[in-house]
Image: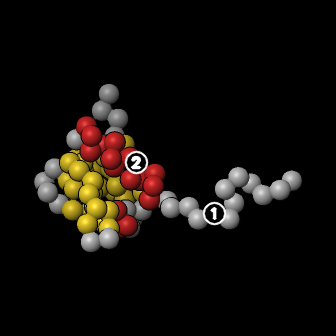
């Protein structure tokens, strides 16, 4: 059968989260992020890289390290 596609290759789970955060930043949209066991709703202003880390910047100016985010989901305001 062979190995499944991408087997043995390292996968960075943050890529999907970064894509979602950057898309939200383009629209200044709200998202929900999970840090530990807690979900939190935030409006994303920007995503920046500094000090070797990617950071979510909220509309209030708070910075959240992307490495602290265990999950993220968009909010459908339709």
Is residue 2 found left or right of 66 in the rendered image? right
In this view, which residue lies farthest toward the top?
78
Residue at image coords 13%, 54%: 60
Q: Is residue 34 left or right of residue 7?
A: left
Q: Residue at x 26, y 45 (%)?
A: 25
Name the residue beneath numbered marker 1: 9
Query: Front-most of 70 and 50?
Result: 50
**Residue at mark 2:** 19
Would residue 29 be seen by someone viewing this image from the given angle?
Answer: no
Q: Position of residue 48 (x, y in %)?
A: 26, 57
Q: Where is residue 1 shown, x and y percent of the image?
A: 86, 53
Callout in the foreground (2, 1): 1
Q: Is residue 47 visible?
A: yes
Of label 2 and label 1, which has the lower sequence position? 1
- Point 27% across, 40% down: residue: 26
The number of discs equals 2
Where's residue 66, x and y in %? Answer: 34, 62
Question: Quarter holding the C terminus?
Answer: top left
Which numbered dot is residue 59?
none
- Tell me the element at label 2: helix
Q: Out of 52 and 16, give the one closest to the viewer.
A: 52
The part of the image, by quadrant, that contains residue 67 is bottom left
């Amino acid at each position: 059968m062979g190995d499944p596609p991408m087997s043995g290759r390292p996968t960075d789970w943050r890529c999907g989260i970064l894509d979602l955060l950057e898309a939200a930043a383009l629209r200044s949209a709200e998202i929900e992020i999970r840090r530990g066991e807690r979900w939190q709703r935030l409006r994303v202003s920007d995503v920046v890289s500094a000090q070797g880390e990617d950071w979510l910047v909220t509309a209030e100016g708070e910075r959240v390290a992307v490495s602290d985010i265990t999950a993220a989901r968009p909010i459908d305001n339709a």
